[in-house]
Image (cartoon, rainbow, N blue to C red):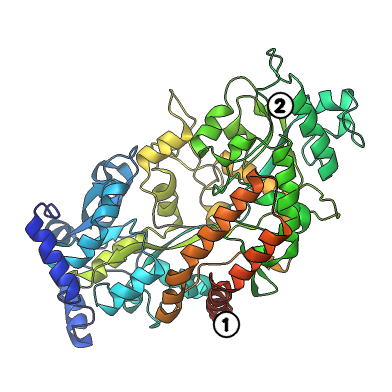
Amino acid sequence: MKRLFSALLAAALTLSLAACGGGGGGGGGATSQDAAAGVDSLVSDYGYQWTDTSAPILNDKGAQELSFNIYSSKNASALDYNDMKIMQDLFASTNVKVNWENVSESVYGQQKNLIFGNASDRPDAIYHAGMSAGEVIKYAQRNVLLPISDYLEYMPNLSKILEERPDIKSQLTSEDGKIYTLPRVEEMGLLEHPNLLFLNKNWAQAAIDAGAVTGITADDLKDGLTLTCDQMAAILAYFRDNDMNGNGKTDDERPMSFVYNNWQGNQCDLYGMFGLNDNLEHRVIVDDKVTYTVQDERFKEATNYIADWVDKGLIDKVSFELSQDNFLANGKGEETYGAFYWWESETVVSNPENYICCAPLIGPNGDQTICVSNNPEVSTGEVIVFADVPNAQVLLTYFDRYYDPLISAQINYGPIGIVYEDEPDADGMLVQKELTGDMTADELRLQNAPLGICYLSDYAWENVVHMEPRAQLRVERLAAYAKPYVPENVKPTPNLQFTLEELNTISSYESNLNDYIRTNLVKWLMNGGVSDADWTTFTNDLSGRTNLSGIQEVYQAAYDRYIGGNA
């Protein structure tokens, strides 16, 4: 692939092509007879086959004469994809030659629109494409994107997944009934519950011994501890007022901490004390109805209660300003965290053995539930193929191999021989190697795994690959201390497909709505709560100028189609 957009002239051409609809060659220009003839030629000339998913896709002649150019952003720590062992192994097993052009995520963000507009100098596909539903519709209508659903007969792995999982098919299918992107599926049941509450048991023991908290004993200080909000407030007050880490200071203890509005370890579980299954979008499905927590009067009560904890110093005010990296850095070395929200203590603090995992807090009215996040375990828009790619069947059959669970594990974590042992265990499952040297598991993974499209679900975890020890620990903790506290009628909002008209409504209003809620909420939490008058104004604006009701109708219509397609 030629270097993209090295001169202003190319950029100008890009804009011109985009205005004319782009995608010179278009999608669907060839007849079905032409397509069949093309496949026959691939079979006869290059030994193309797609039915045996363990055999090469092309013969040696095909490996020499056919190739594809794929553009992809990558993590800064990752090797060039051309140098990754998993990519070299895929070539050895498929005979499909891929030339990767890697760029940083920021460069891709800058070049994305130019790439899509410039039909004369495009790659064959984009990996880590990050396509939104609106972008898919826009470029599909311009015949820039290849309708992948027209080629599913050449993709046996993905076809089987879509047949067995209509929910995934529904999330991929656009308004015109076609599929234009390839998904990433990594299902461990983690993302729905991004928070767990950890408590410093040694500090809590000191609070009990001092008589600062009643109703619990030292024997209760173990995983699964259930505390009322009053008990937690008393413990946090003791942490605030005493030199808990014994360094001679009483002002460096952080009673309760989180990372405000972070994707994990955030403030949302605190709203569970008032029976609200809140999340960062404040949108959840209750009894199959799209519900916004900010429309509930309990949200006002909860906000004022939490704001009181902030005002009293029970919640560290820095929690509203810290980045995730700073939060994690502050937990290392000398103990300063009394209680915090995260997935595991092992990531946050230097002495995780000093912390226990608690059940959700019981609120003043007896409520006990937690956040239900809308973070999806099925990601759409991961890979697109351009409509004018030659030999599209071969490229899609190649991508289809990524959905084999054995390949998926290596795409997602790293290859056999580097991340996984050369030989499986007695059950025939991949086992991660023990770490050697100074490299962490995350560093080894990021260096050697391209991530992206894969299919890792129950079958893979039970038959093909062992979960990472950290992931297994999270699964066990969430099963014990999170999932039992969510009502059966409450679910996260899944990935939804919208019509063009619906997308126009969302693009016109949703960003302003989110900004309005976010601005008011952080102000209230940091400054003592929300007054009756301010709450009245807020609720009036939600139903008025922010058009929450219109946005809610759009999500409800899309969700109704989603459950209808999965019935």
**Residue at left 13%, top 70%?**
16
Q: For residue 58, what is the image quadrant? A: bottom left
Foreground residue, 208 or 456? Answer: 208
Give the crowd class for mark 1: few <14, some 14-19, many >=20 residues within 10 Å.
few
Question: Of the numbered discs in the image, which one, if any, rests on residue 354?
Answer: 2
Up-down: is 251 above or below 516?
Answer: above
* The furthest residue to the front: 533
How far apart are the alpha carbons under marks 1 and 2? 48 Å
Residue 94 in the image, given as x and y percentages of width and height:
27, 57
Q: Judge by depth and name the residue closer to the eye, 236 or 153.
A: 236
Q: Is residue 213 visible?
A: yes
* The disc label shown at residue 564, or none: 1
**Residue 152, position in %: x, y?**
35, 75
Question: Local crowd at mark 2 within 10 Å, few (<14), some, or many (≥20)?
Answer: some
Q: Are marks 1 and 2 in contact (CB under 8 Å)?
A: no
What is the secondary structure assignment of the residue under circle 2?
helix
Amino acid type for the residue under numbered disc 2? Asn
Location of residue 115 (image quadrant): bottom left
